[in-house]
Amino acid sequence: MSSFPGSPRLIKGGLVLLDPVTSAVQRVITLQYNPDQLSRSLQIQGQTGEGDRLEALRLKGPPIETIKLEAEIDATDQLEFPDQNPDAVQLGIAPQLAAIETIIYPDSSQLQNADQFASSGAFEIFPLPAPLTLFVAGKNRIVPVRVTEFSVTEEAFDPSLNPLRAKVSLGMRVLSVNDLDFASKGNSLYMIYQQTKERMARSASGNNLSTLGVGGML
């Protein structure tokens, strides 16, 4: 008789930062706990000319999709084993917060270089592109995003005032073909995301007109 194999492996959501040129993975940010709720809104991109019969059924492009979630970060589990988690003892959850927060900061070296160029009277040099941010929530939802909202509520602190528990609210805008170069890695991932939706929509089409109590449309 075989023994119980244990609990199934839990898939976690998170963020992945890619180099915008080489697509190399720069950083993986795993959410400690998957959010209990994730809200999405889709703003339809239809033609706006009211009364124009030629435009009534046209779509200009994919909808503008926004994603909002709240994630919890807690150092309690790590502090139970201080020898194995020295960073948690010294810094609490500050590193985890910084990993998410610095996504919306330009690199400090770019700021310093910009100041040096400005002080020398040189022409302005545009900063390098920021990493491409992906929101990952399972294999069927890997989307390029721009973080548009970030707020954090720190709820407990150690004697050195390092945060030990926090709730992070994230707002993200999905980047589509309207935002990215069509040949880019980001757009390739977006197209896979949309095509996955289309396949799932086809697999759900099991109803017919009789379900609605209608015999036909003619």
Image: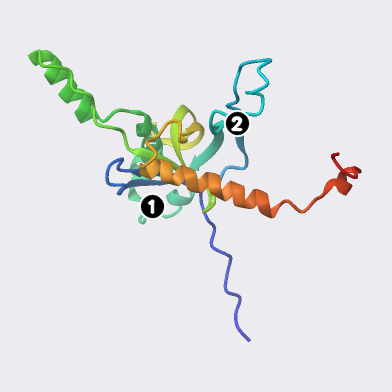
Does residue 131 show up? Answer: yes
- Asked if the residues shown at circle 1 and circle 2 are in contact, with their CB atoms under 8 angstroms apart, the answer is no
Q: SS at mark 2? A: strand
Does residue 30 show up? Answer: no
Which residue sits at x=71%, y=52%? 204
Q: Is residue 213 left or right of residue 134?
A: right
Q: Nearer the viewer, residue 105 or 204?
A: 204
Quadrant into which the N terminus falls: bottom right
Graded by Cα atoms within 10 Å as few (under 14), some (14 to 19) or many (20 or more), the crowding at tag 1 reads few
Q: Position of residue 83 (x, y in %)?
A: 35, 55
Q: Nearer the viewer, residue 146 or 32?
A: 146
Kindly identify which residue carries mark 1: 82
Which residue sits at x=44%, y=46%? 189
Kindly identify which residue carries mark 2: 42
Q: Nearer the viewer, residue 187 or 30?
A: 187
Q: CA distance from mark 1 to mark 2?
A: 45 Å
> Is 145 situated above or below 25?
above
Q: Position of residue 182 (x, y in %)?
A: 39, 39
Q: Amino acid type of disc 2?
A: Leu
Residue 132 lies in what quarter of the image? top left
Of labels 1 and 2, earlier in sequence is: 2
Please give the label number shown on residue 30. Answer: none
Q: Position of residue 60 (x, y in %)?
A: 54, 28
Q: Amino acid type of disc 1?
A: Pro
Closest to the camera, between mark 1 and mark 2, is 2
Which residue sits at x=80%, y=51%? 207
Residue at the limit of the structure toward the bottom, as seen here = 1
Q: Position of residue 176 (x, y in %)?
A: 47, 35
